[in-house]
Structures are given as structure tokens and as C-alpha cells.
Amino acid sequence: AQRVTQPEKLLSVFKGAPVELKCNYSYSGSPELFWYVQYSRQRLQLLLRHISRESIKGFTADLNKGETSFHLKKPFAQEEDSAMYYCALSRKDTDKLIFGTGTRLQVFP
Amino acid sequence: NAGVTQTPKFQVLKTGQSMTLQCAQDMNHNSMYWYRQDPGMGLRLIYYSASEGTTDKGEVPNGYNVSRLNKREFSLRLESAAPSQTSVYFCASSDDRGTQYFGPGTRLTVL
């Protein structure tokens, strides 16, 4: 069965500290992995996807097939990074997403 | 472009009442989705529609029905609301790359 696990419900850091939001998945094929973000009073939006291999707002995520992980990292957190972050997975033959339970990131000044 | 719009923003129902949540997108996307978001459970797919005229069940379809009225609109109906359906409901559509675009959500309370 396909599943996405985000083990941390809440992650609190101080501004300037490194951040790593964990995401592990289970899927027998080759998945597509995404990170979506929901800022306060805004709608859910795509942050990045593993295929693009890009850095958005200083965040990066590397797909590790051996560890079945897709952790989201940022070397220096900013207060405006405070939000709810969701890891999601889709099969290559469908656009349906399976979401993790989300991690709330709080960045204190 | 308005993107994905949803109505209403808030709704309170009594157990057994029915209602329809409306969703529309102006991005010419083929695929549309309905999710519910509950604390500690993330987003779970209720129904989706890969194209006009087709709908399929997602992870949690019980108690819901959907209609893909045309390419733009995808509605979600609760025939007999139950307290377990208290949730925040999100509609989304996806582009050809699989990126999903979300509406602002409908906060539903069933008493």
C-alpha cells in the first residue's frame, strides 16, 4: 500500500537555525514526490517536486530511494517559513496525491 | 484568473441535512479533486474526476456524492450530514505536470 509518513507534528526552531522536515514513503514503484505548504490564511500550494530538482525559497529536498525518504531542508530558517508542510506522493500513471499528516513549522525570532 | 474557487466558505448543518459544496476552476484543467482535512490526518481524497463526465472514488468516499457538471465545475454533495463529516473541505485541480492547485476551503460543522 502507498503511504506517506511525516513523523513530526510540530517542529520549532529559532530564526537562522537549520531545518529538516522528515518525510518517508512506502511505494513499490517509482513515485513522484512533492512538498506542499500552507501559510496562515492562505491556500495550500506547491513548494517543490523532486523531478524539478530545484530550490524554492531556500528549501531543497532530495529523493533517497534507498531510505525511501524525501526530507525537506533549509540551512537558515526565516520567520516567514512558519507554516504547515505536507509531503505527498503520486504514482507516475496518475495525478492523485497521497498526503502525509503534515508538520507544522514554527520559526521563532 | 481566479484559479480554484469554492462556495460557501463556512457552513453549519444539523445532522441529517443535505448540502452541496461548489467548486470551479478557470485554468482549463482536466482533473479535479475533493479532499477533506482533519487534524492529525492530513488531506484525504474523497473523490476525483480525471475528465468531464468521469468520477472515481478516493480514500474516503462514504457519505458523499459528486458531479462533474462540465470541465470547470465539480460539486460535492452530502445527502445526510453526520457529525463525522465535520471537516475542512478542499477542492483542487491539476495541470498536465500533475501540480495541484487548491481552493480556499470550506469549513463545515455538523451538529
Image (cartoon, coloured by chain):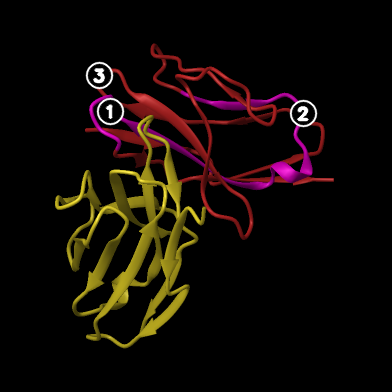
Cα distance in 3D space between marks 1 and 3:
8 Å
> What is the spatial separation of the Cα atoms under label 3 and label 2, in whole angstroms?
34 Å
- Name the secondary structure under disc 2: loop
In the rendering, at what x and y percent does residue A44 appear? Answer: 51, 49
Residue B77 horizontal side relative to residue B99, left or right: left
- Earlier sequence position, callout 1 versus callout 2: 2
At label 3, the amino acid type is: Gly
Chain in red on the image? A
Which chain's residue wears label 1?
Answer: A
- Residue drawn at (53%, 46%), measured in percent from left and top? A9
Which residue is painted at 24% across and 21% down in the image? A28
Q: Quadrant of residue B16?
A: bottom left
Q: Nearer the viewer, residue B52 or A28?
A: B52
Residue under circle 2? A76
Q: Quadrant of the C terminus of chain B?
A: bottom left
The residue wearing badge 3 is A29
The one nearer the camera, B103 or B38, is B103
Q: Which residues are magenta?
A: A70-95
Using the image, tell me which numbered label, if any, was put on residue A91: 1
Q: Are marks 1 and 3 on the same chain?
A: yes
The chain coloured yellow is B
Mark 2: amino acid: Phe
In magenta segment, residue B10: no
For label 1, count other residues whose C-alpha is less than 10 Å away and answer few (under 14), some (14-19) or many (20+): some
Residue type pointed to by label 1: Arg
Helix or strand or loop: what does disc 3 sit on? loop
Of residues B96 and A71, the one drawn nearer to the viewer in this rendering: B96
